[in-house]
């Protein structure tokens, strides 16, 4: 009988831990940048706290995905699903809360070429692990 941990091990590509750890690390300075640069008030009060909180949650989940992938843990399914969800939410709110012009264009480009594709890749990783477990 094949152990479930071996199935998780084969379902997670070798590049996943390094990429997600890297993404978590590069999101840290971005979050600090937002904490300093975002206005305290936008249409709602505590605008800056909301964005920094969302990005902090994203850092935590990117890190959790990296750790679970490294450890070949079954928890990768939960971590990857939460990460993909936060990436999609971040893309959505970045685009729809951006002011017009360059801010909107930048948000749209980041959403289309980075956040949403990464969300799909992350969900694919979770689905691969799940499909290997379902076949047992």
Image (cartoon, grey):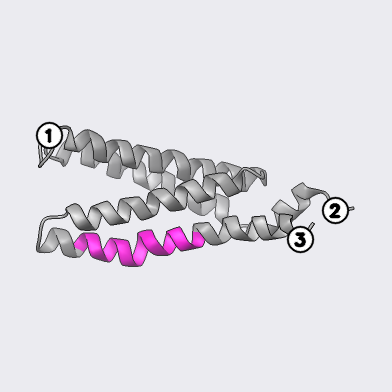
Q: Which mark is residue 2?
A: 2
Q: Are marks 3 and 2 in contact (CB under 8 Å)?
A: no
Residue 62 picture location, percent across and down: 46, 45
One can see residue 32 in this view: no
- The residue depicted at 24 percent of the width and 53 percent of the height is 94
- The residue depicted at 39 percent of the width and 38 percent of the height is 57
Q: Secondary structure at mark 2?
A: loop
**Residue of label 1:** 40
Q: Is residue 83 magenta?
A: no
Give the main secondary structure of the magenta stretch. helix
Q: Nearer the viewer, residue 80 or 136?
A: 136
Q: Are marks 1 and 2 in contact (CB under 8 Å)?
A: no
Is residue 11 found left or right of 118 in the rendered image? right
Identify the mark nearer the N-term, 3 or 2: 2
Q: Quadrant of residue 88?
A: bottom left
Residue 1 picture location, percent across and down: 90, 53
One can see residue 124 in this view: yes
Q: Nearer the viewer, residue 131 or 30?
A: 131
Cα distance in 3D space between marks 1 and 2 = 54 Å
Image quarter where the C terminus lies is bottom right
Cα distance in 3D space between marks 1 and 3 = 51 Å
Q: Is residue 70 above or below residue 52?
A: below
Mark 3 Cα shell of 10 Å, populated few (<14), some (14-19), many (≥20) = few
Mark 2 Cα shell of 10 Å, populated few (<14), some (14-19), many (≥20) = few
Boundaries of the magenta span: 106-121
**Residue of label 3:** 135
Residue 118 picture location, percent across and down: 43, 60
Cα distance in 3D space between marks 3 and 2 = 12 Å
- The residue depicted at 77 percent of the width and 49 percent of the height is 4
């Amino acid at each position: 009988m094949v152990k479930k941990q071996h199935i998780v091990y084969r379902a997670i590509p070798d590049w996943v831990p390094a990429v997600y750890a890297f993404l978590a690390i590069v999101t840290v300075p971005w979050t600090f940048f937002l904490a300093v640069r975002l206005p305290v008030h936008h249409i709602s009060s505590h605008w800056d706290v909301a964005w920094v909180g969302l990005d902090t949650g994203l850092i935590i989940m990117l890190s959790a995905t990296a750790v679970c992938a490294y450890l070949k843990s079954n928890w990768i399914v939960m971590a990857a699903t939460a990460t993909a969800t936060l990436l999609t939410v971040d893309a959505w709110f970045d685009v729809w809360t951006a002011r017009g012009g360059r801010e909107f264009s930048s948000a749209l480009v980041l959403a289309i070429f980075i956040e949403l594709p990464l969300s799909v890749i992350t969900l694919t990783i979770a689905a691969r692990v799940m499909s290997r477990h379902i076949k047992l």
